[in-house]
C-alpha cells in the first residue's frame, strides 16, 4: 500500500478523510482490484499514523460511496463498478465448495471429507470456524459425522467409504504378508517397537493395528511373548 497524497491536499482533512482518500486513490489506480481485501485495521493505523476510530471512519466513507463492502469476521473488500454483492467469506466458500461438490456429483454419498487440519490450511480458518461451517452442512442433511473417523457426505445412515486409519493400514500390510507366506503359521510377528519404526508411527498405533489383526483372525497374541500369525483356517472367510 502506497500513500502518495500531496500534503497540501491533506492538511485540512480529518484523519478519517485522509484514510478514505488514500485508499480511494489506491483503488482507482488499480493497486486494489475488485475482490481484493484491504489491509487490516491495525495495518491501516500504522500506514496512516492514525487511530482505530479514524480508520473505521475512513472505511465507513468508502462503504457509503459503494467502493468497499465489509464481511463480518473476514474484513473489507473492494467492489467493482455496479457490483455491490460482498465477496464470499472463507467459511462461506467452504460451505459453497462442499455443497457444489455434492450437487455436481464430484462428492458422492459416503465419500469422506478432508480432515479438519487440511480444511484449516486450505481455507485459512480456525478450528471453531471450520466446525461451524460443517455444522451448517450437517443441519441441512448434506453431511454427517462418525466421531473420530471423520465427516462424510450424506445424512446419518449413509454407507461410508473412508480412508483406513493408520492402525488399519498397518493391519492390512501385515495381513498381506501373512497371506503371502512371509510370516508362517505360529511365527512371531515383529515387535511393537520394530513395527513403529517401520511405519513411522507410535506404539499405540501399532497396538491398534495388532488389535485389528486379532479381530479379523489373522493373528493371536500370547501375553508376554508376542503376537503370532494364525493358521489359514482362522483367516477371514473372504480371502482370495
Image (spheres, rainbow, N blue to C red):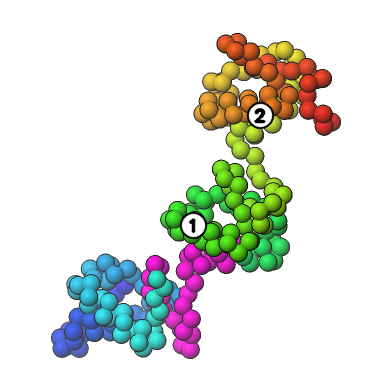
Residue 105: say if magenta: no
Is 104 placed above or below 203 here? below
Q: Residue furthest top?
A: 225
Q: Which mark is residue 212?
A: 2
Q: Quadrant of the N terminus?
A: bottom left
x 78%, y 28%: residue: 236
Q: Is residue 3 in sight in this rendering?
A: no
Is 54 placed above or below 227 here? below
Point out residue 155 in the picture as x, y percentages from the top left corner. Answer: 66, 57
Point out residue 61 in the picture as x, y percentages from the top left corner. Answer: 30, 85
Residue designated by label 1: 130
Q: Quadrant of the C terminus?
A: top right
State how far apart marks 2 and 1 are (Cα): 31 Å
Tag 1 secondary structure:
helix
Q: How many marks?
A: 2
Point out residue 85 in the picture as x, y percentages from the top left corner. Answer: 48, 81
x 71%, y 63%: residue: 105
x 72%, y 28%: residue: 216
Tag 2 secondary structure:
helix
Residue 61 shown left or right of residue 95 in the figure: left
Q: What crowding class fits label 1: few (fewer than 14 Cα within 10 Å), some (14-19), or many (20 or more)?
A: many
Q: Which mark is residue 151?
A: none
Of residues 43 and 216, the one nearer the viewer is 216
Magenta segment: 73-98
x 69%, y 51%: residue: 157
Q: What crowding class fits label 2: few (fewer than 14 Cα within 10 Å), some (14-19), or many (20 or more)?
A: many
Of residues 72 and 3, the one nearer the viewer is 72
Residue 79: say if magenta: yes
The quadrant holding residue 217 is top right
Amino acid at each position: 500500500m502506497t500513500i502518495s497524497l500531496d500534503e497540501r491536499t491533506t492538511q485540512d482533512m480529518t484523519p478519517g478523510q485522509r484514510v478514505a482518500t488514500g485508499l480511494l486513490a489506491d483503488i482507482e489506480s488499480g493497486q486494489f482490484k475488485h475482490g481484493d481485501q484491504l489491509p487490516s485495521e491495525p495495518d491501516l493505523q500504522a500506514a496512516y499514523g492514525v487511530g482505530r476510530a479514524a480508520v473505521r471512519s475512513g472505511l465507513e466513507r468508502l462503504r457509503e460511496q459503494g467502493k468497499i463492502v465489509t464481511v463480518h469476521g473476514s474484513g473489507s473488500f473492494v467492489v467493482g463498478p455496479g457490483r455491490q454483492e460482498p465477496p464470499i467469506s472463507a467459511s462461506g466458500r467452504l460451505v459453497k465448495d462442499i455443497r457444489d461438490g455434492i450437487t455436481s456429483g464430484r462428492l458422492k454419498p459416503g465419500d469422506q471429507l478432508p480432515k479438519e487440519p487440511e480444511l484449516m490450511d486450505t481455507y485459512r480458518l480456525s478450528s471453531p470456524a471450520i466446525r461451524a461451517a460443517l455444522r451448517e452442512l450437517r443441519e441441512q442433511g448434506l453431511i454427517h459425522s462418525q466421531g473420530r473417523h471423520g465427516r462424510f457426505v450424506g445424512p446419518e445412515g449413509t454407507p461410508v467409504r473412508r480412508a483406513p486409519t493408520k492402525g488399519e493400514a498397518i493391519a492390512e500390510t501385515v495381513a498381506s504378508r501373512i497371506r503371502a507366506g512371509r510370516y508362517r503359521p505360529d511365527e512371531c510377528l515383529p515387535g511393537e517397537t520394530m513395527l513403529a519404526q517401520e511405519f513411522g508411527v507410535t506404539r499405540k498405533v501399532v497396538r491398534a493395528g495388532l488389535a485389528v489383526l486379532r479381530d479379523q483372525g489373522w493373528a493371536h497374541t500370547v501375553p508376554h511373548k508376542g503376537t503370532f500369525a494364525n493358521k489359514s483356517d482362522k483367516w477371514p472367510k473372504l480371502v482370495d
